[in-house]
Image (cartoon, rainbow, N blue to C red):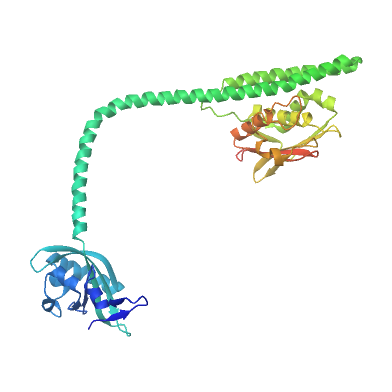
Amino acid sequence: MSIKYQTTMNYTIDYKELLNTSPCGYFCSLPDGTIIDSNKRFLEFTSYEREEVIEIKKFTDFLSMGGKIYFETVYVQILNLSGAVEEINFDFIRKDGTKLPVLMNSVIVKDTEGRHLFTQSTVFNISQRKKYEQELLIAKRKADALSDELKHSNKELHRSSELILQQKLQLEEFNHHLENKNRQLSNFAYITSHNLRAPVGNLKSLQDFYNESTDMEDRAMLFSKFEKVIGHLTETLNELIETVKIQEDINIVHDSILFDTVFDKTVEILEGQILDSKAVVTSNFSEATKIKYPKLYMESIMLNLLSNSLRYRSPDRVPKIHFSTKITNNEITLLATDNGLGIDLKRHGNKIFGLSNTFHSHPDSKGVGLFMTKTQIEAVGGSITVQSEVDKGTTFKIVLKKSSSY
């Protein structure tokens, strides 16, 4: 009897007809495999009439011997264990003896006590998919044959291209070498122009003090400072020249250095500016006294930070500058704190370490020091941050590379 259902949209759906005209075949079978019902699509797949199938045939009657063996030994076992089987491929043998590739899904229906009542199965015609798979297989074979021909033909081209590739790699290596040397020379130029300006300016300050002094002892003291600054200047020049000799792919040399030693040398280089400004310059490196670090970089970092603090001191108070170290999470941090003019970080925070950026109208401001300092620190895996407040002072925090030993 046809079952109909009235929807809210006034559509009448005949579910029996819907089942019969479904694009997939459907049949219901007893536990022994006997088919007790099916839709029209399933009968179309088999080419049999309804009275030739229902309660007469089993699904295995439509299978070859190999298909029957697989059905009994694999398909039925999986179905009984899990209660359902999905997407198993069989070759369906129709009434006229032709084969129809199908994809089969089954599910067991049980009563309330768990007894197997019957099995519901769907059968999909996959002949078009099989045909497409065959076409793909043929196309793949042709592609493989063509690929073999191309591989054979490309051998000679490959031999020729190897020479071209080798020359290309040599050019790339040479270009990388030139880029590396350009970066080294650029860094050298920045270091030279910036690091030499401070001791030369210091010599000028000491010269002014010397010319103004009439006391012989003061002059002798100032002359000794001349000798120290000139000695440091000579040493810095030699070290800068050595940096030019660094070749490509040679790691930056990490020296075992004492913070106190580098700091004392920095103070001596800037002695004239310290005297002129009457600055109080102190240090405390007790928490981390030494480190493995490029000596030239550490000297340049301290020189830049101390000269910045002296340059941007407040005219309203005695300059106080303090350098220190601390250890946090196996990292050495260098701190440089002053009570100078400070920096408006809201306005300039995003460009404070940019090249040629200045934040005060000081005549000696070049906008190179902090850029170079940041570049050197990051070159060995560190980082630099700044905390500052206008007219209260600035603190630079330099986190050095984690693997640095101390």
Which of 337/118 is in front? Answer: 118
Which of 160/130 is in front? Answer: 130
Q: Number of callouts in the render?
A: 0
Q: x, y (%) of residue 265?
A: 74, 26
Q: x, y (%) of residue 196?
A: 70, 20
Q: Is residue 166 above or below residue 39?
A: above
Instruction: Place residue 165 in its image quadrant.
Output: top left
Q: Is residue 24 above or below residue 235?
A: below
In the picture, measured across the screen, residue 14 lies left or right of residue 34, that is right
Q: In which quarter of the image is the C terminus?
A: top right
In the picture, measured across the screen, residue 250 lies left or right of residue 297, that is left
Q: Which residue lies furthest to the right in this view?
A: 215
x 16%, y 68%: residue: 45
In the picture, measured across the screen, residue 89 lies left or right of residue 162, that is left
Q: Residue furthest front?
A: 10
Q: x, y (%) of residue 79?
A: 26, 72
Q: x, y (%) of residue 86?
A: 28, 67
Q: In which quarter of the image is the N terminus?
A: bottom left
Could one spot residue 399 in this view of the protein? no
x 71%, y 19%: residue: 233
Could one spot residue 381 in this view of the protein? yes
Instruction: Place residue 290 in its image quadrant.
Output: top right
x 27%, y 77%: residue: 15
Q: Residue furthest bottom?
A: 113
Instruction: Place residue 316 in its image quadrant.
Output: top right
